[in-house]
Amino acid sequence: MSNPKGILYLIPSLLGDAPVENSLPSYNRQIINSIDEYIVEDIRSARRFLIKAKIEKPIDSLTFHLYNEHSKNTDINSVVNGLMNGKNVGLISEAGCPSIADPGAEIIQFAHRNNIKVVPLVGPSSILMALIASGLNGQNFAFNGYLPKKEPDRIKALRQLETLVFQKNQTQIFIETPYRNDSLLKDILNACREETLLCIASDITLNSELIKTKTIRDWKNSKQSFNDHPAVFLLGKSAY
Amino acid sequence: MSNPKGILYLIPSLLGDAPVENSLPSYNRQIINSIDEYIVEDIRSARRFLIKAKIEKPIDSLTFHLYNEHSKNTDINSVVNGLMNGKNVGLISEAGCPSIADPGAEIIQFAHRNNIKVVPLVGPSSILMALIASGLNGQNFAFNGYLPKKEPDRIKALRQLETLVFQKNQTQIFIETPYRNDSLLKDILNACREETLLCIASDITLNSELIKTKTIRDWKNSKQSFNDHPAVFLLGKSAY
């Protein structure tokens, strides 16, 4: 008979310097205090997060396994050894929910293939919170990650996404590296129709949070800058 | 000069009978205790939720505006009167996050058009939690709501979604009315390829939570029933 296996807890971290009380249920702290082995994208920021989440165990008593975009599939076996041997393990991502835009997905697929129970905890997701607050169609939406970097490709991608907005009434969500937000915004304003709705949701859960849905026409008349503020962009159409 | 307007708080409710401490940050209770006007899909379940969330104000002192699929756009004006006149208002949906699969989106679009600040609170989203825990691609995914009810249309829709999985590496998410889950599962097993991954995530945040990603081949060999358990279905491909 095989040993009982551990549980893989998916532990959301904070978006930027948000207060823990605003972003995480108290149950998450209970889980954090019950386990002592983690798989993380970056050890320093994981330690910082656990301290901010008011972990009660001494940080130095914990085991951290690094797993990030530089890891190879072959690294998985060493990282999941504890899990396979009955230890509960927490997966922590850099910002927000694990595996949405990070390499944790491979760990989670491994867990499913090996009959390891996967338990997601509640936490902030900038994509989901942006979608909710945008007022754009939440019954049909797609998240596209990053768009192509070069201008002609990006304009083409934006026009394709706008076509999906009107053909399928499917809200289109995408992100950009924060220092390039204004450049992306310029391309959106060039590529899209005047009546298309654009939501920009920046600094979600922070004091500086700003979430605004306007027509492309109205965005053209506003002179806001979003550079260096993590933001989610959404294209959609009016519900009216 | 126009009066200052209120803030529209988007207040997630619980998924089924989950404990509040597992699903909501303590900040949400603070917000709930600071406002006394709500826009809700169903008044009875909103009251029940507020009591469960340990609201301190007497429930009978609160104002509830009903806004659901039977409401017309013309009803909005009466519902948002408080907001327009400086009152902070909470939008509560039936289960999980407002406006993802409910009529709240119209209220939120109204708020944006009228320069009312929209603030989303953190809470459980079955779609997002299912996606995270599935291990399927979270960098590109689409939520498709409900599929067509009739079998030939549904099989066709499932094949189209599966094509998107492989063409775009885009995880495809959809839901069904719980009493029809097994019928949907049967159609998925008929329509999709043996090596396609299917995740079924049911009873999320409840004690009976079950989240399992397996190939269609492996699902065919298991005899599980999901009828009457709220579930999210996801199609994706292996990360390997």
Image (tube, coloured by chain):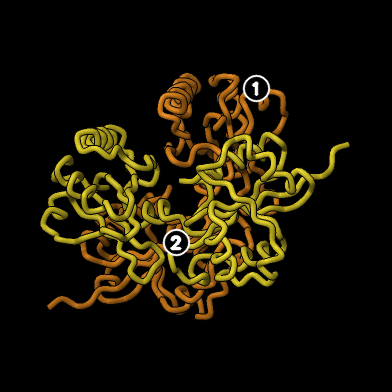
Chain colours: A yellow, B orange
* Residues beneath discs 1 and 2 located on the same chain: no
Residue name at image x 57 percent, y 57 percent: A43
| 3D distance between C-alphas at marks 1 and 2 | 39 Å
Mark closer to the observer (1, 2): 2
Q: Quadrant of residue B201?
A: top right
Q: Is residue A43 above or below residue A68?
A: below
Tell me if residue B94 can be seen: no
* Residue at numbered disc 2: A15
Q: Nearer the viewer, residue B41 or B104?
A: B104
Provide the chain ID for the residue under circle 2: A
Relative image position of residue B161 (x, y in whole percent): 45, 27
What's the amino acid at mark 1?
Arg
| The one of B156 and A101 positioned closer to us in this rendering | A101
Secondary-structure class at tag 1:
helix
In the image, residue A164 lies at what x, y percent? 29, 34
Q: Position of residue A65 (x, y in %)?
A: 64, 51
Three-letter code, disc 2 = Leu
Q: How many marks?
A: 2
Chain letter, disc 1 residue: B
Q: Nearer the viewer, residue B158 or A148?
A: A148
Q: Is residue A218 above or below residue A145?
A: below
In the rendering, at what x and y percent does residue B234 appear? 53, 35
> Residue farthest to the right?
A1
Tag 1 residue: B217
Quadrant location of the C terminus of chain B?
top right
The residue that appears at 42% across and 38% down in the rendered structure is B140
